[in-house]
């Protein structure tokens, strides 16, 4: 492997990389950086999450930027504000010895007037989310007529989030002779279509086999039902005392509910989703990076831009709507050469989707048993013992107290002292798990099927499916086109061959039916019918549904809808996550916690 010096970078950049601890380039950096520096040909790059792709496109742009020209020369588009902020910070770090290089990061949820003021002062590189970038172009505050480079980072996710129209508008504002650099962790058909439409004979580089998972990540699944899903999550946390994880959920509601449950039960947890303001997100991420928060519960969109290299686990509380997103989730762990574990909680119906994911990542899921109470207690006990055993003794600090301590314990034998110590620190775990059931026995009455997660949702049948070229992104976009409500929550989506199901927040049940009745939309030339269904999820039986009216559709079959229900860039206030601190005497990631404050 070459060094960064071999890649043709100037000394100020090399000095900054040295300060940051960069020693050797990653595979994608080694391939992409010389290609961008030496050629104006468009570049299509496959780079898994955690492979250093930000440096792969930003270092050559920093190298080639004309500092005597204050026009904007590069526009870097990213799907989320978190990722945009992270890219901007990385570029500032890479260019710290090039003080004349100016960068500005623009995104929704922040003061646009302040962003306009920064742009007016001049910016060689602009990093932005598609929506805010288009807004600034429309206000004539961002001029892209002199652009040399356009970077589409996480292109697959931008399409999943419904940013195709915004991408079109940004690219239309750039000159034809620009160099387009497309980076993506997966290459579904829609990304290949962007490459065909907006790139000229691009060179393709990869950091591994396209659309595969990282070899540093092992994949496990636990079989659950709705009643045992959260208890299984708790047991996974408890059996891994040093866990440092992201738990992925599908919706904001699910995210907040799981985080609240973990906080209530004494875990160092918090949530990250679209209802948080930027200040709240920054606060959560700061706690997570410092490991004050050990379990971060997040939606797919909110988790983009999380730059943490030592996660032990990624836990899929629910599988993503689009199985390609599993690669993004699992790629948050196993980074920078470390090993990681990606865990999936699935019920019997969802288990079949694992085969499709296995084909994509070209790895197998290992069936794993949910830990029993005895296994957890044993793991936590010996973790505590090892922690005490390895504790360094600072005699000078405790020497004055020791005579009194020895006197207190002089009537106890060695065995009695150990027994009392273990009991005092471990009784809460023992009592909690003493009479718990085996969660792997899904047939037991205690673990019988529950529907708690769907009790606030209405399930709809729709008369189009996979054969109509329907997918979750199109379904979400077309539902949003009906203008049912700004804060509508879309739940589970099941796309079948000739029909499909989707869930809507119960409070929008009547307005959903009314909107579809009034709009009478079409999909691919077909009128669309929906009905409220009471049947069990995943079945083909259409009995027992209350009749609805026509609803859904769009004359543009290829449209991409933005999922307002999952991640809306407008934020609303929320209480801060409760702060918890480990009881340092308890050891491990147990239930015994000392509450500090609840803001």
Image (cartoon, grey):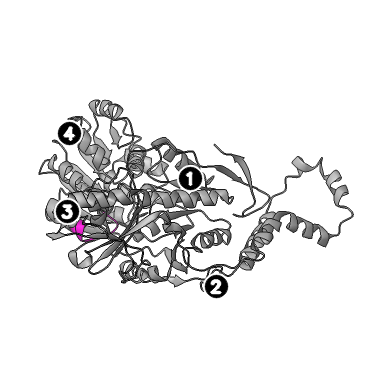
Q: Which mark is residue 138?
A: 4
- Give me the C-alpha separation between circle 2 and circle 3: 46 Å
Q: Which mark is residue 228?
A: none
Q: Residues within 10 Å of mark 1 (few under 14, many from 20)?
A: some
At mark 2, the secondary structure is loop
What mark, if any, has residue 521 been given in the picture? 3
Instruction: Magenta stretch: give its range.
Output: 184-192
Q: Are marks 4 and 3 in contact (CB under 8 Å)?
A: no
Q: Which residue is mark 1?
A: 289
| 202 left or right of 95 in image | left
**Which element carries disc 3, helix, strand or loop?**
loop
Which residue matches tag 2?
Answer: 444
Q: Is residue 5 visible?
A: no
Which mark lies nearer to you, 2 or 1? 2
Q: Earlier in the sequence, mark 2 or mark 1?
A: 1
Question: Image check: 369 left or right of 583?
Answer: left
N-terminal-most mark, 4 or 1: 4
The vertical placement of 44 against 356, above or below, is: above
Q: Nearer the viewer, mark 1 or mark 3?
A: 3
Q: Tell us which disc is closer to us: 2 or 3.
A: 3
Label 2 – label 1 distance at C-alpha: 40 Å
Tell me which label, 1 or 3, sits earlier in the chain. 1
* Sequence-first tag of 4 and 3: 4
């Amino acid at each position: 492997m070459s060094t960064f010096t071999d890649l043709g970078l100037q000394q100020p950049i090399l000095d900054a990389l040295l300060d940051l601890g960069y020693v050797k380039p990653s595979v994608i950096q080694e391939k992409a950086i010389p290609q961008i520096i030496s050629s104006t040909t468009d570049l299509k790059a496959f780079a898994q999450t955690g492979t250093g792709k930000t440096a792969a496109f930003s270092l050559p742009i920093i190298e080639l930027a004309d500092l005597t020209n204050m026009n904007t020369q590069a526009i870097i588009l990213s799907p989320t504000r978190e990722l945009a902020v992270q890219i901007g910070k990385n570029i500032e770090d890479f260019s710290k010895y090039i003080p004349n290089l100016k960068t500005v990061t623009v995104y929704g949820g922040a003061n646009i007037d302040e962003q306009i003021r920064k742009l007016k002062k001049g910016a060689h590189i602009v990093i932005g989310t598609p929506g805010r970038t288009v807004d600034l172009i429309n206000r004539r505050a961002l001029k892209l007529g002199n652009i040399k480079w356009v970077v589409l980072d996480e292109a697959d996710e931008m399409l999943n989030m419904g940013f195709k129209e915004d991408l079109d508008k940004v690219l239309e504002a750039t000159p034809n002779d620009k160099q387009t650099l497309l980076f993506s962790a997966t290459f579904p058909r829609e990304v290949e279509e962007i490459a065909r439409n907006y790139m000229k004979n691009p060179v393709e580089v990869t950091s591994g086999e396209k659309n595969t998972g990282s070899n540093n990540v092992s994949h496990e699944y636990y079989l659950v039902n709705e009643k045992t899903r959260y208890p299984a999550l708790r047991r996974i946390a408890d059996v891994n005392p040093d866990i440092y994880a992201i738990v992925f959920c599908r919706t904001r509601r699910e995210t907040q509910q799981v985080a609240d449950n973990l906080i209530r039960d004494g875990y160092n947890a918090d949530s990250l989703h679209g209802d948080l303001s930027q200040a709240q997100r920054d606060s959560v991420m700061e706690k997570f990076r410092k490991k004050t928060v050990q379990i971060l519960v997040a939606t797919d969109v909110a988790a983009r831009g999380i730059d943490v290299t030592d996660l032990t686990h990624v836990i899929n509380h629910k599988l993503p709507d689009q199985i390609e997103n599993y690669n993004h989730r699992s790629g948050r762990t196993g980074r920078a050469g470390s090993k990681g574990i990606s865990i999936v909680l699935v019920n019997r119906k969802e288990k079949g989707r694992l085969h499709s994911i296995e084909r994509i990542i070209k790895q197998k899921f290992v069936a794993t048993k949910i830990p029993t109470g005895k296994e957890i207690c044993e793991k936590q006990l010996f973790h505590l013992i090892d922690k005490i055993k390895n504790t360094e003794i600072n005699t000078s600090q405790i020497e004055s107290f020791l005579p009194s301590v020895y006197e207190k314990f002089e009537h106890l034998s060695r065995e009695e002292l150990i027994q009392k110590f273990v009991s005092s620190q471990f009784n809460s775990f023992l009592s909690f798990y003493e009479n718990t059931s085996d969660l792997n026995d899904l047939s037991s009455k205690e673990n019988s099927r529950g529907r708690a997660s769907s009790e606030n949702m209405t399930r709809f049948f729709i008369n189009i499916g996979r054969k109509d070229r329907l997918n979750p992104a199109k379904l979400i976009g077309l539902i949003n086109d009906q203008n049912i409500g700004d804060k509508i929550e879309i739940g589970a989506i099941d796309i079948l061959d000739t029909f499909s199901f989707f869930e809507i927040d119960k409070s929008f049940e009547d307005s959903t039916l009314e909107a579809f009745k009034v709009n009478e939309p079409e999909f691919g030339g077909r009128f669309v019918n929906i009905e409220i269904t009471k049947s069990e999820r995943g079945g083909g039986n259409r009995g027992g549904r209350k009749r609805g009216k026509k609803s859904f559709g769009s004359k543009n079959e290829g449209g991409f809808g933005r999922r307002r229900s999952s991640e809306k860039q407008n934020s609303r206030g929320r209480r801060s996550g409760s702060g918890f601190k480990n009881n340092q005497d308890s050891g491990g990631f147990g239930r015994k916690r000392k509450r500090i404050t609840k803001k």
